[in-house]
Structures are given as C-alpha cells and as structure tokens.
Amino acid sequence: MSINRRGVRTGADVISEIIDRQMIQSARVIIAFAHDDYAEHIGGIQIVSAREQAHFQELGDSYISVFPRRPMLGLSGSPTEDFLVQCRVNGVLLDESFPLVEFAHAFSEHFADQSVIVVMHSVLGHSPEAIQQAVNLIDPLSAFWWIHDYTVHCQNYRLTRNGVNWCGDPSPESQSCQLCSYGAVRRQHTERIQSLFDGVDWVFAAPSDVAADQSVSGHTPLPQRPLVVPHGEIRYVGVKREPCRDNEKVRVAFVGHPATIKGWDRFIAFVSDAGLAAENFEFFHFGAKDQSVPGVMFVELRPEPGGRSVATQKLVEHQIDAVMNIVDGKETFNFVTFEAMAAGCCIITSDRSGNVIAAAARENLLIEVADDPESFDYLGMRDQIRSKRRIDVGEFHITGLTPSLLLMVNP
C-alpha cells in the first residue's frame, strides 16, 4: 500500500488493492455515495446502505460504498481534484482515504467491462463537483438519487427554519431564509446541487409520497417528481399478543436516539406534564444510552449486524402499547414508525411529522396530538390507545431498496 506525504493513498493504489484481493468478480458493480460509514454509525440511511449492500451481494453483484473522509452536515469546500473519500467494498473497509476523481479514473480503466450502477444516498460531506467528474468518468448504465431527506433543497436536511420550525422550501431570497441560520449558505448550496443534477442523467426515487410531493412543491424543485418506492412492508404471520385491559396502565415509549429533532423533548414534556394522569401510564425509552429520566424505564436497543432492527421484538417483549414519535419536519419514511406498528403499537404524533402521520393513519394506529403538551388529553389518549392497539404482531421487512428500483425502471 503506497502512502504519500499527506498520508493519503492514490486512487490507482486503491484499485490495485481491489484487483489483488479479487474483491470485484461480478459483472455488475454498484457504487453508492453515502454520508458516512454505514457499519460505524446508526441511522435510517445507514440501515438502507447496509441492507442494500447485503441484498446486492445476494444477487451476485459487487457493492462499493463511498463516503467522505470527514463527514459533515454540509458540502465539502475542497478543490475537486483533492476531495478525499474512503470506501467499503462488499462490506470490507479499505485502509486510508484517497482522491475520489483519481479513484474513478483508475476504476474506469481497469473495470471497463463491468456494468456500473451509481446510487446517491447522501450528498452531505461530498463535493458535488468531484462526484460529477467521477460519475462521468465511470459512465454508469444508470444513476439513481434517493430522496432520504431534503438536502437537495438546503444544507439543513430537515428543512426547518433555524432547526426548529418547518419552512417548506421558500425562495432563497425570502425573508424566511434571511431569518434562518442556514440562509447565508443556501443559494450556493442549491446552485452546486443543481449543477450536479445537470451534469448527470439521474433517476430520482423517494420512499414515500410525502417525500416525493415535497421534493417538487417548493422554490427549489427537483427536475421531475421522484418514483415512489417504499422501503419496506409489514408482514403478518398469525402471531398474537394480549389485548389491552381496562384495569392496566398504558405503556408509552420513545424509541431511538434522544434528539430534539426526533421528538425527545416532546416526550419528556409529555412525561413531566402528566400530573395526576401519570397513574394511568408507564413510560419507557428504548435506545443505546440511558438518559436517567425519572419515571422513564430504559431498555437498551441496538441494531443487529447489517442494520436489522430488533425494535419490534423489544416492544412486544415489554408490552408497549404506543410509541411517541413527534418529529420536527416532514419525515420521508421513518423506520421507527413501521417497526412500532409491526408490534401492534399506536403511533402518537402531530400533523407536522410527514410520513409518520401518513403511515399511521393508513394502518388506523394514529393518535394525533397538538404540539403543546399542556393541551394533551391524557385520559382520552389512554382510551384511544386501548381501543386501537392491535393484537396482531408482524415484522417489518426492508424490501424497497435500489434492487427494487432497478426492477421498476428496467422490468
């Protein structure tokens, strides 16, 4: 392995290692751009990347996940030729970083006989200019761009003004943007994204109608409405759980990382403001780290290798009746919602939560609440949960990834 003075490998050296280790033996290669290493970080896009890699390998394809050397919540300002990335090939992490454009040039020379599919899962942390050069050098059969979030419209991937209130993609020159902490960089951000749109023949895809509709409804719309390919489905096989009983407390949980943007503060407010009504409830937090909140029981929850969640199993084991999921911004999919519904749980959420409320309404598991905790009708909510919570237990299967999208585009 050759290392130059900066401690960075050349793109040609990376390709030589791939060849020497015979890491690409398939006729088709998928090159997917991600925000970070899906094996080291937890999140929705990481779950998608991990499951997609496994699925493509089952199909006999090779999968290269490319992510920035330094992940960040913005676009890279590095010169195009110097933009550095790392990669996993079929799940194996290669040592050190390397220039993306150099890598693409060497790849195009040594793997000219392979059919290549390019997938964009996240542009955050990347140089759009380097990606455009790399994709053009590789010359793929198809290039797909997933709308997992709203980074095509703003550096703030949740489209929330100052990270708090949903903004809905206003004009970059609007007063709304001028009042926002992201406003100063938004024009440059969207112009760089637009150049990448123009430089590659992308097929856009979204995991929900909510995401697809939003992506074309604001002031910085996509060139066309994305194809809608839901990430998965709940399958039932006849497994049952005990129904709610009128004389038992209702169990309400928060599932996942305790971040404000994911509704953690609203959950804590819900717990603390319950008052005398708290005697009708038991509260839980399923996550990776105990926050030591009085009155909230912690249950450790970590994904299995390959990104597979065990949330449904844990929720059933602890007899959870409802999951509170009041997120800021319109969620494009939200795995927690589907994993909770598979356990028969009701979903407590607000009308601002995008696909969370849409999915829960379709399953008749929706408990809609106002944003103000003081207006919560605790006893009414208790009764709704008791009447709606299901006894059928299923499993959420991730099926709608790029392999499904390929079948839709090339049946």
Image (spheres, rainbow, N blue to C red):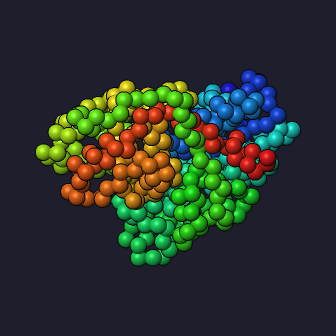
Q: Is residue 216 above or below residue 5?
A: below
Q: Position of residue 10 (x, y in %)?
A: 69, 37
Please tell me which residue is depicted at 73% across the width and 49% down the height of the picture.
408
Q: Is residue 263 above or below residue 162?
A: above
Q: Position of residue 380 (x, y in %)?
A: 25, 51
Please tell me which residue is depicted at 41% across the width and 73% down the height of the picture.
176
Q: Quadrant of the N terminus?
A: top right
**Furthest-top residue in this view:** 21
Q: Answer with the quarter of the image where residue 290 lies.
A: top left
- Image check: 4 left or right of 373? right
Q: Position of residue 124 (x, y in %)?
A: 54, 51
Nearer to us in this view, 51 or 5 = 51
Please tell me which residue is depicted at 34% across the width and 44% down the height of the picture.
387
Tell me if I can see residue 170 in this picture.
yes
Q: Is residue 281 above or below residue 140?
A: above
- Image check: 160 left or right of 233? left
State how many labels appear: 0
Nearer to us in this view, 149 or 103 = 149
Tell me if I can see residue 127 in this picture.
no
Please tell me which residue is depicted at 47% across the width and 37% down the height of the picture.
342
**Furthest-right residue in this view:** 113
Q: Answer with the quarter of the image where residue 19 lies.
A: top right
Nearer to us in this view, 308 or 91 = 308
Q: Position of residue 389 (x, y in %)?
A: 38, 41
Nearer to us in this view, 143 or 382 = 382
